[in-house]
Image (cartoon, helix red, strand yellow):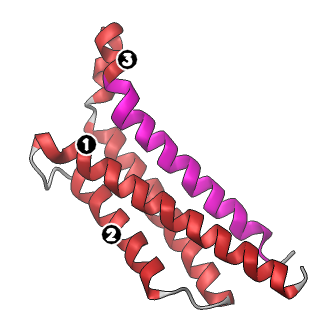
Amino acid sequence: MKSAGLYLLDASAIGLSGLCLLHCIALPVLAAFLPMLAIWSKAAWVHLLLVVLAAPLAAAGFWRSHRLRPLPWALWGLAMAGLAALLAGALGWTDENRETSFTVAGSMSLASAHLWNWCRRHRIDIDAGA
C-alpha cells in the first residue's frame, strides 16, 4: 500500500495532539492533587517542544498527502489555523487567560485536519482498490 507511511504520520500527529490536550487540560487538574506536577503544567518549554514536534510532523504528513492527490483548501486552512493557534499559545502571544483556550483549539483543529486527511486518503485507497 503506497500510503501506509502517510497513515502513520497522521496517526502520530493525532497522538501528539492528544498529548497536548492531556498537558493542557489534565495536568493542571492533577497538579492540584500532586503539587510536584505543577512545574510541568506551566512549563513554557513543554509548549514549545510540542509545537516544534507538531509543525514538521504536520507539514510532512500533509505535503506527502498533497503530492499524491491535492488537498482541499479547507483542509489546508484548518491545519494552518491549528498550527497558528498552537504557536500563539506556546509563544505567549495571548494573555495568560486565553493561552489554554488557544492551545486546545489549535490542537483540536490540527487533530481534526489529520483525521480528515486520514479518512480522505482511506476513501481514495478504497476507490483505487488498494
Locate residue 19 relative to residue 42 in the image: left or right: right
Q: Which residues are magenta?
A: 3-28
Q: Which residue corresponds to the image point at 62% horizontal and 54% vertical from the top-left?
A: 12
**Which amino acid, by three-letter code, is at mark 2?**
Ala
The residue at which mark 1 appears reads as: 100
Q: Which residue corresponds to the image point at 56% horizontal and 80% vertical from the top-left?
A: 63
The residue at which mark 3 appears reads as: 30
Q: Above or below — where is 74 with respect to 8?
A: below
Q: Is residue 8 magenta?
A: yes
Q: Which residue corresponds to the image point at 32% horizontal and 69% vertical from the top-left?
A: 81
Whether residue 90 is visible: no
Mark number displayed over residue 60: none
Q: Helix, strand, or loop for circle 3?
A: helix
**Which amino acid, by three-letter code, is at mark 1?**
Thr
Q: Local crowd at mark 3 within 10 Å, few (<14), some, or many (≥20)?
A: some
Q: Which residue corresponds to the image point at 53% horizontal and 63% vertical from the top-left?
A: 57
**Which amino acid, by three-letter code, is at mark 3?**
Leu
The residue at which mark 2 appears reads as: 81
Q: Picture coordinates of residue 82 (x, y %)?
A: 36, 63
Q: Main secondary structure of the magenta part?
A: helix
| Quadrant for the C terminus in the image | bottom right
How far apart are the alpha carbons under marks 1 and 2? Answer: 15 Å
- Furthest toward the right, the residue is 129
Q: Above or below — where is 93 with respect to 40?
A: below
How far apart are the alpha carbons under marks 3 and 1? Answer: 16 Å
Q: Local crowd at mark 2 within 10 Å, few (<14), some, or many (≥20)?
A: some
Which callout, 3 or 2, points at the residue further toward the start of the chain? 3
Q: Local crowd at mark 1 within 10 Å, few (<14), some, or many (≥20)?
A: some
Whether residue 106 is visible: yes
